[in-house]
Amino acid sequence: MDLRLKQRAVIEFLTTEGCSPIEIYSRMKAVYGEMCLDVSTVRRWTRRSREENPSELTVHDQARTGRPLSASDSKHQSRVDQLIRENRRVKQIDISIFK
């Protein structure tokens, strides 16, 4: 499980128990150390947890609309590799507009 998901679950659990955001942050900082979320993130997630019904909370992010982070498949990867082999100095703009 991703560390951020684990920390979000801890925040939601401790919020449901009535802990304050600063108390949650200090307890998490003792456990996670430098890998702990920022206090502003703890506050934001605590606020969201309080606004929702505890039985309906989810630690996973909701799907977002818009451009995907990555659009790679074997066809596109092989085509990009071919473009690079043909011209080592090919520019990103040239790669992005290939058909």
Image (cartoon, helix red, strand yellow):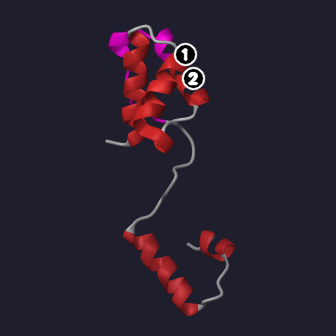
When the figure is inspected, residue 70 is found, relative to residue 79, above or below; the finding is above
Q: Magenta part of the protein: which range?
A: 47-63
- Lateral position of residue 13 relative to residue 34, left or right: left
Q: CA distance from mark 1 to mark 2?
A: 5 Å
62 drawn magenta: yes
Q: Which mark is residue 47?
A: 1
Q: Which mark is residue 5?
A: none
Amino acid, disc 2? Arg
When the figure is inspected, residue 46 is found, relative to residue 72, above or below; the finding is above
Indicate the quadrant containing the C terminus: top left, top right, bottom left or bottom right: bottom right
Q: Are marks 1 and 2 in contact (CB under 8 Å)?
A: yes
Residue drawn 38% across and 9% down? 17
**Residue assigned mark 2:** 44
Foreground residue among 84 and 19: 19
Looking at the rendered structure, the secondary structure element under dot 2 is helix
| Disc 2 crowd, CA 10 A, few/some/many (<14, 14-19, 20+) | few
Looking at the rendered structure, the secondary structure element under dot 1 is helix
Foreground residue among 40 and 61: 40
